[in-house]
Image (cartoon, rainbow, N blue to C red):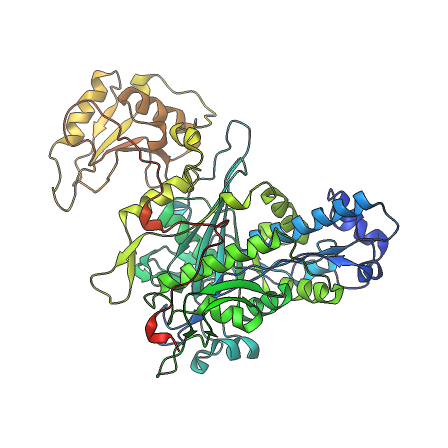
Amino acid sequence: MSGARGGGVGPVGRSTVRGAVPGAGDVADSTSTAADDDATAEDGGANVAGTGEDGAGEGAGAGAAEDGGAGGSGGGRRAGRGTDRRRRRRRVLRWSATLLALVIVGGAGAGYLYYEHLNANIKSDKLNLGDAKDRAAETKANEAGQKALNILLIGSDARDTVENQKLGGARDTFNGTPLADVQMLLHVSADRSNMSVVSMPRDTLLDIPKCTDPDTGEVFRSLTREITNSSLGRGGPGCTVATWEKLTDIHIDHFMMIDFGGVVSMADAIGGVPVCVDANVHSHTSTGKGSGLKLAEGTHDIKGEQALQWLRTRYGFEDDTDLARAKAQHMYMNSMVRQLRSEAKLTNPNGLRKLAEAATRAITVDDGLDSIKKMYDLATELQKVPTERITMTTMPNRYDTVQTGRVVPTEDAGKLFRLVREDIALDGKDAAKATASPSPTVTDAAAADQDIAVQVRNGTYTDSLGAARGRASAVTEVLVGKGFTDAKADASPATTEKTTVIRYPSADLQADALRVAKALGVPAGQVKQSTDVSGVTLVVGADWRSGTAYKAPVQDDKTPTSAETMNAADTSQCMHVDPAYSW
């Protein structure tokens, strides 16, 4: 990993503060010196992803840590200003804290956004360590020029310090290869009207692409059916990003990663987040497993190490699985968001300073977020998202039939990823946008139909039906009949493609691919850029096993019920306790 980035450490004068966050306006003006902040500081925030509870010993991704993270922000005001100005500043500062916490769901935020020396604390790493062929295309802007944001939040189980070892247990794993035991994709809509979070269970089996360590040059070969949390140890968080992009075809703009110690320090600084259990619970087994969480029935404000225990708890909630743990994490995050967006605030300036220092020391981000200014700008983008439009989900999955205790994505997972990819809100409140097909930005004109070379492949193979014979030749004849005389059928064995798709390798062939799609009635959303092909390539999918006319499938844009949605504004959330862990 690259080391700290940003400005130097030292005294920060009045002029330095004003220049630290260009364009921050009222917020930058509301602070001047450390002495000013001592007078009356306001507003901070934290947020959590997490790390593991079980200790080591469950194989590549198991037994490790279980989930946490936090973040915050704050500031002060000077005396002698009018009442309206003070109120306005309080609102601005509270929003800064709230939004930064949202940005770093599972990470850690900075309290004083104005001090340049905090930049030196921030560690950064390369965003994506995978090969170009495994990467998703960059997100296209909407008609208003706005782009959706996708941020991968990672909770590391690293036991690389005395504090992390004490908090995480499993002494035999000290300074071992870290695991990405919490992975959450935060999607912010292009128009900033809504936000979606998709958690992936750490026990998920999937394909991990080839990754190259940016520091050592070590190449990690691609793996199949590997537990997802092992991706972090293959060069760093950029390999976890590459794994998500390969699975979901969603372009990820940033990542944020936090460890055990960061969770505790941030959760402690915020001063407590209310959580609820429907019975007495003690997460502890006779063999020493469990997070150690012990709570009586009802609602409690938790902070510090107890917050980490909540976020790590697996044994004691619902069915004692990673899925229940993800649900508890969602409850905690929702509760914290509500608290930060109400009147909750940190009023101790020394506490705010500690929060800022701890947060920037604990967080690792990609190179595109390696300064306080960049994180503040990102937080500002999130200011428009109302609490009631924040939706938490878990990737739909089923238990694997071969490896006990592991899960694999289901067909519903593919649907959920498509909704995120197409910027369709998971709360179902933007139906008008969901029915409109996005218009791709085309930078070149299509060639004449007879000059467009098209390779046609048979992708109709399915486990239950086999392959429909002769489909590549039949559809090639359709294309030739429509004037695409340079279309050729690929005689290779049939592959598996659920939906008919047209792929092209580079931007200069996008218009040609779209022209072929229009001629056949294939929706523009099924035209994809891919380095797996050398020219415009039509793959006849299992949805076109017969006939000469393509009928586009009707898209169902409702969020699958198996995603177990949870709304951030729902105050009735309470975790169900497994009776075996009640006292």
Q: Which of 258 and 512 is in front in this view?
A: 258
Q: Residue at x 34, y 57 (%)?
A: 222
Asked whether residue 296 is in view, the answer is yes
Q: Position of residue 575 (x, y in %)?
A: 42, 63
Where residue 520 sits, quadrant-wise, is top left
Q: Which residue is drawn at 44% across and 78% down?
A: 173
Number of on-image labels: 0
Q: In this view, does 272 lie to the left or right of 390?
A: right
Where residue 63 sits, quadrant-wise, is bottom left
Asked whether residue 239 is in view, the answer is no
Q: Is residue 516 left or right of residue 401?
A: right
Q: Is residue 224 left or right of residue 577?
A: left
Q: Nearer the viewer, residue 225 or 271?
A: 271
Quadrant in which the N terminus is drawn: bottom right
481 shown above or below 207: above
Where residue 484 sits, quadrant-wise, is top left
Quadrant in which the C terminus is drawn: bottom left
Q: Which residue is drawn at 52% across and 80% down?
A: 166
Q: Which of 430 and 420 is in front in this view?
A: 430
Name the residue furthest right.
80
Q: In this view, does 38 lie to the left or right of 235?
A: right
Q: Where is residue 39 in the image (x, y as percent from the top left)?
A: 82, 60
Q: Where is residue 527 in the image (x, y as percent from the top left)?
A: 35, 31
